Image: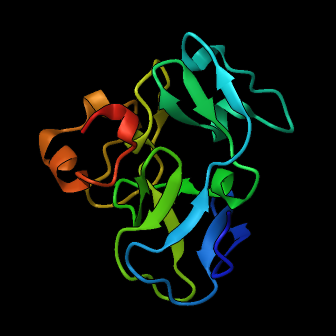
Amino acid sequence: MDNPKAAVLPHPKFGSGVFAKENISKNEVIATFDGTIYTAEKCSDLPNDPPLKIRDHAIQTGMHTWQDSNGIGRFFNHSCEPNCGIKGKTNLVALKDIKNGEELTFDYDMTENSDWAMECKCRRANCRKIIRGYRFLPGAVKKKYRGMISEWLGE
């Protein structure tokens, strides 16, 4: 289920991204990963062929499961200073009030804990330079994210 207050639009650096079309309130659900569920031993085993690029767009929902989105969820970019988080296993929600026009982002480490890793290009002041899984997050970041990470991670 996609929130009509958000839309996929061209992004100046990353091809596309999700942006607020209206103000969005804290804790409002913005998107759901409601698509196909994939099973693999590790993230690198997931298919990543165009146009779907499952490995690049699905989120981890269990030790050996990943779920894609049928909507805008797969277009959210990562940020080390996100304005969205995860409720349950598959809902992207606003971490704070978001203003019309702002890009909506989440920290990919809020769901991932496999062998997956990628260079971070968010360029935020607190950028970790690499996104590589929840277990590698500093304790202070885990504490800040408490209540807004995938429930499969057990926090």
Picture coordinates of residue 91, whole percent (x, y)? 52, 55
Q: Quadrant of the C terminus?
A: top left
The reply, left or right, for residue 75 in relation to residue 60 is right
Is residue 14 among what the camera can see? no
The image shows residue 152, relative to residue 70, as above or below, that is: above
Residue 40, image quadrant? top right
Colouring of the image: rainbow
Picture coordinates of residue 63, whole percent (x, y)? 45, 20
The image shows residue 99, relative to residue 142, as above or below, that is: below
Picture coordinates of residue 36, whole percent (x, y)? 74, 36
Residue 101, image quadrant? bottom right
Which of 80/93 is in front? Answer: 93
**Which residue in the rendered view is the most extreme toward the top?**
41
- Residue visible at 28% across and 60% down? 125
Which of 9/71 is in front? Answer: 71
Which of 69/17 is in front? Answer: 69
- Residue visible at 53% across and 18% down? 64
The reply, left or right, for residue 34 in relation to residue 70 is left
- Residue visible at 68% across and 25% down? 38
Is residue 30 among what the camera can see? yes
Picture coordinates of residue 39, whole percent (x, y)? 64, 18
The image shows residue 106, relative to residue 109, as above or below, that is: below
Residue 111, image quadrant? top left
**Which residue in the rendered view is the most extreme toward the right?**
51
- Residue visible at 63% across and 38% down? 58
Which of 50/70 is in front? Answer: 70
Q: Quadrant of the N terminus?
A: bottom right
